[in-house]
Amino acid sequence: MRRVVSRALVAAAVGAMALGVGGGVASADDGTAIWLLPGVDAGALLGPTVGLPTALLAPVDGVLTYLAG
């Protein structure tokens, strides 16, 4: 009986911790939301890289726009 109660308490503690960490990470920043997993937001880490493809492709866009007339 003690073993069952112990397992239930451990499962409840792990679940509460996962919900607390997930909610805290997802609501920590109001900037760009980049979701790794549901509830895990990596926007603060990956936010600066969002504009990188646009910046890298800007010269190509300029050449294509020039060639198209």
Image (cartoon, rainbow, N blue to C red):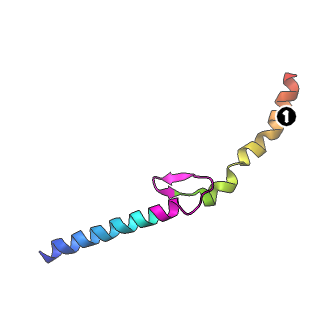
Looking at the picture, how far across and down is residue 37, in whole percent?
47, 53
Query: Magenta residues, as a range?
Result: 23-40
Seen at 34% across and 68% down, the residue is 14
* Residue located at (51% from left, 53% from top): 36
Left/right placement of residue 23 relative to residue 15 reads right
Q: Quadrant of the N terminus?
A: bottom left
| Residue at far top of view | 69
Position of residue 29 in the picture relative to residue 54 (left or right): left
Which of these two is toward me, 30 or 25? Answer: 30
Name the residue type under label 1.
Gly
| Mark 1 surroundings: few (<14), some (14-19) or many (≥20) residues within 10 A | few
Measured along the vertical axis of the image, is residue 53 above or below residue 19? Answer: above
Q: How many marks?
A: 1
| Quarter location, residue 56 | top right
Q: Residue 54's quadrant in the figure?
A: top right
Q: Position of residue 19 (x, y in %)?
A: 40, 63
Which residue occupies 51% across, 63% down?
25
Q: Position of residue 31 (x, y in %)?
A: 63, 56
Tell me where residue 48 sits by quadrant: bottom right
Does 46 lie within the magenta span? no
From the viewer's perspective, is residue 35 above or below residue 10? above
Between 18 and 29, the residue placed more toward the observer is: 29
Tell me residue 35's x, y (percent): 53, 52
Q: Which residue is mark 1?
A: 62
Q: Residue furthest bottom?
A: 2
Q: Is residue 51 left or right of residue 62?
A: left
Location of the C terminus by quadrant is: top right
Residue at the image position 52 percent from the left and 60 percent from the top:
27
Q: Name the secondary structure under disc 1.
A: helix
